[in-house]
Image (spheres, rainbow, N blue to C red):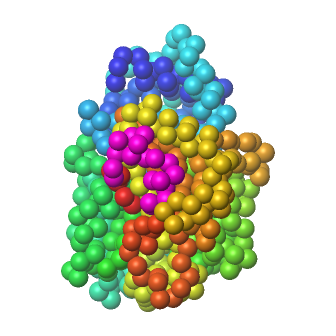
């Protein structure tokens, strides 16, 4: 919001992509504070830079997956998405802006690097002097020589979902008394969920809660996990809970899935969707492959092995899935950070995941808890959890990672909390499509017996550093598949602390968020 900051960044983006002259771009955001003002600035700058057409969501609103779909559907040259994802909103919180390329996906490192480089030497920006343009109703209008096309933010996305999923079967599910609670967290997914779940599919009115996007997300933290969506989580784990529960985040690309009496981890959700995707019309022909981020559990690997399809392990960040999707090497992708999606767009997609689950439940006739029990009995269970230590003083967090990195080669054979280290390394990725190399993607500790701990510093926060510790243990004993995840992972949690010295480095004795 400081003078010229947004303008400099937008101009740097236009310059880095070779200019906006003659281009068609998509614009929209999640409705957080500054979304409306930023949209007007971006429109005037696009006009001054010679753009031919801007397709903008009504009231400057678009979920991230809907923006990705619009870019692809309309053959646009890219898009500007105004969001800070799952971070809080409001005048004292966060705002963000990112560029998506013509495939609908996040800009790859080459483009983001060029944008950053341009911000270091930019001396001027172009902006049209004009009044605000009306974005409140769909239709075309002009800003200088540029066409501004205001579109219904939901319509094209809803049509895509109707092609992918068996809406008739889901309607019958709701007509039979199936109950749902979807928490939109006062964020962008509210209008989409109301239109599709209640309007198209017949979920009972009021099934979608917190459905009006607010500039400060109602003072909440729009991150769909058991900590920030605690009310929904507690309801679903109670006997009074509905049959199915879900939540989505600020810009609509993340999801949390629950059934009555059960929380489904994102890693397990990805695995179930991969195993059952053939039940949805859009995936009836089967999957070409699956992909997961390195910290995500190996649950989907076991499904892929049974299906006889490739499973790709990538760094964290949806952009790494883009090449695999474009090359037809993967159909469904997922991250443990509550993100799943497919080749229908080039972003993760929270409501898509909810509809996939509803399609599976409608086709199988099984409640979520029974479906998970059947899945674990067939594939084994990868007990999994992520422990986040937030807003750590950056120097302390970096010292922890540097110290652990320096000791990786000495760790094999070490015993910690009853576990023996089998291997330790730092993950690096060579893209099988374009050959690009990405180093420094997380420290991995593997234990004998299949357990593992992964350590990463996250870049999604805006204060200090967030240390993420990913914990996993494989269980195949049928008698031990229904344990509490934290209890099952207790030896791995203790070993991770003993090896990394989290308390010694950070002063923290417990994580801020457990998912």
- Is residue 375 something one can see in this rendering? no
Q: Position of residue 299 (x, y in %)?
A: 57, 71
Instruction: Please state the horizontal and vertical placement of residue 464, each as a whole percent of the image.
Output: 39, 34
Look at the picture and state if 164 lies above or below 342: below
Residue that appears at 35% across and 67% down: 246
Q: Main secondary structure of the magenta part?
A: helix
Q: Is residue 354 magenta?
A: no
Q: Is residue 495 magenta?
A: yes
Q: Position of residue 408 (x, y in %)?
A: 63, 47
Q: Is residue 130 above or below residue 69?
A: above
Of residue 496 and residue 42, the one placed in the foreground of this image is 496
Report the side of 344 relative to 58 (left or right).
right
Residue 242 is at least partly visible in this image: yes
Q: Is 307 or 447 nearer to us in this picture? A: 447
Question: In the figure, 219 relative to 38: above or below?
Answer: below
Q: Residue at x 63, y 76 (%)?
A: 303
Q: Quadrant of the C terminus?
A: bottom left
Residue 454, above or below 216: below
Q: Quadrant of the N terminus?
A: top left
- Relative to the observer, which residue lies in front, 263 or 428? 428
Q: Quadrant of residue 302?
A: bottom right
Q: At which x and y percent is residue 367?
A: 39, 85
Q: Which residues are magenta?
A: 493-510
Q: Residue at x 56, y 82 (%)?
A: 476
Q: Is residue 251 left or right of residue 304?
A: left
Q: Residue furthest top?
A: 123
């Amino acid at each position: 919001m400081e003078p010229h900051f947004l303008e400099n960044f937008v101009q740097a983006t236009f310059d880095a992509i070779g200019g906006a002259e003659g281009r068609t771009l998509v614009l929209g955001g999640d409705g957080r504070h500054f979304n409306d003002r930023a949209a007007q600035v971006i429109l005037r700058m696009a006009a001054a830079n010679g753009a031919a057409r801007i397709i903008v969501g009504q009231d400057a609103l678009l979920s991230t997956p809907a923006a990705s779909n619009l870019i692809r559907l309309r053959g646009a040259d890219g898009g500007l998405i105004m969001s800070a994802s799952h971070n809080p909103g409001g005048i004292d919180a966060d705002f963000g802006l990112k560029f998506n390329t013509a495939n609908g996906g996040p800009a790859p490192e080459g483009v983001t690097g060029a944008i950053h480089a341009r911000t270091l030497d930019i001396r001027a920006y172009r902006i049209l002097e004009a009044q605000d343009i009306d974005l409140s109703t769909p239709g075309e209008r002009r800003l200088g020589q540029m066409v501004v096309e205001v579109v219904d933010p939901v319509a094209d996305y809803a049509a895509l979902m109707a092609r992918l999923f068996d809406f008739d079967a889901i309607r019958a599910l709701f007509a039979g008394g199936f109950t749902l609670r979807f928490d939109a967290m006062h964020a962008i997914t509210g209008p989409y969920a109301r239109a599709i779940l209640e309007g198209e599919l017949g979920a009972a009115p009021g099934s979608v809660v917190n459905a009006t996007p607010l500039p400060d997300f109602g003072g909440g933290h729009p991150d769909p996990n058991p900590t920030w969506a605690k009310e929904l989580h507690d309801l679903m784990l109670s006997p009074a809970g509905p049959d199915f529960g879900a939540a989505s985040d600020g810009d609509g690309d993340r999801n949390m899935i629950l059934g009555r009496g059960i929380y489904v981890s994102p890693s397990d959700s990805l695995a179930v969707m991969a195993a059952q995707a053939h039940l949805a019309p859009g995936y009836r022909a089967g999957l070409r492959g699956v992909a997961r981020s390195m910290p995500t559990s190996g649950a989907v690997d076991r499904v892929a092995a049974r299906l006889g399809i490739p499973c790709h392990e990538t760094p964290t960040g949806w952009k790494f899935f883009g090449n695999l999707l474009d090359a037809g090497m993967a159909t469904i992708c997922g991250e443990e950070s509550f993100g799943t999606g497919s080749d229908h767009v080039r972003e993760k997609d929270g409501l898509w995941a909810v509809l996939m689950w509803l399609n599976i439940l409608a086709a199988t006739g099984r409640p979520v808890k029974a479906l998970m029990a059947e899945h674990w009995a067939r594939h084994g269970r990868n007990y999994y959890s992520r422990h986040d230590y937030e807003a750590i003083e950056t120097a302390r967090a970096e010292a922890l990672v540097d110290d652990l990195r320096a000791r990786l080669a000495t760790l094999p054979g070490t015993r910690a909390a009853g576990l023996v280290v089998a291997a330790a390394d730092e993950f690096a990725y060579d893209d099988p499509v374009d050959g690009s190399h990405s180093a420094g993607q997380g420290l991995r500790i593997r234990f004998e017996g299949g357990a593992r701990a992964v350590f990463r510093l996250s870049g999604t926060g805006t204060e200090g550093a967030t240390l993420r510790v990913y914990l996993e243990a494989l269980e195949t004993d049928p008698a031990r598949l229904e344990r509490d995840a934290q209890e099952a992972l207790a030896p791995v949690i203790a070993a991770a602390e003993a090896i990394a010295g989290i308390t010694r480095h950070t002063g923290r004795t417990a994580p801020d968020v457990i998912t």
